[in-house]
Image (cartoon, rainbow, N blue to C red):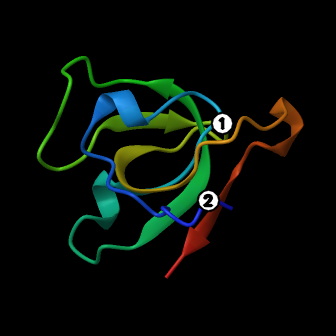
Amino acid sequence: MNPHYPISGKNRSAIKPGARVRIVQKQDQRTGRRTEGIVKDILTRSATHPHGIKVRLAGGAVGRVKEILDASFLSEDEGGASMIK
């Protein structure tokens, strides 16, 4: 893993499909609980967003990126999501 990770998810240019990220889903905003997964789609159109770029993970979860853990491209069968406390 790159020593510069994790990095902020506020810049769209830093997020690509296939990147491993941690997001906060809408229902978890109050607790800050994060969901880890692989980016399937980038939903935010603007270049930046103060609360994080909105993405859809391979497992279907939608939320704003709080951390980019690894931008290495992974195979599609490694998708999904796991909960992080």
Secondary element at tag 2: loop
Q: Which mark is residue 1?
A: none
Q: Are marks 2 and 1 in contact (CB under 8 Å)?
A: no
- Quick check: 76 left or right of 50? right
Could you tell me the amino acid type at mark 2? Asn
- Residue 84 vertical position relative to residue 36 in the rendered view, above or below: below
> Residue reaching furthest front?
3
Which x, y percent locates residue 27? 31, 59
- Quick check: 24 left or right of 81? left
Which x, y percent locates residue 53? 29, 38
Residue drawn at (17%, 50%), measured in percent from left and top?
A: 51
Residue 1, image quadrant: bottom right
Residue drawn at (44%, 35%), measured in percent from left and top?
A: 15
Nearest to N terminus: mark 2 or mark 1: 2
Q: Nearer the viewer, mark 2 or mark 1?
A: 2
> Quick one: label 1, few (<14), some, or many (20+) residues within 10 Å?
many
> Quick one: label 2, few (<14), some, or many (20+) residues within 10 Å?
few
Secondary element at tag 1: loop
- Residue 19 vertical position relative to residue 8 in the rendered view, above or below: above
Which x, y percent locates residue 5? 50, 62
Q: Which mark is residue 2?
A: 2
Residue 25, image quadrant: bottom left
Residue 60, image quadrant: top right
Give the camera-side residue of 55 and 28.
55
- Residue 6 vertical position relative to residue 77 in the rendered view, above or below: below
Give the camera-side residue of 21 and 63.
21
Give the camera-side residue of 38 and 28.
38
Residue drawn at (33%, 36%), measured in percent from left and top?
A: 54
> Residue reaching furthest top?
45
Q: Which mark is residue 58?
A: 1
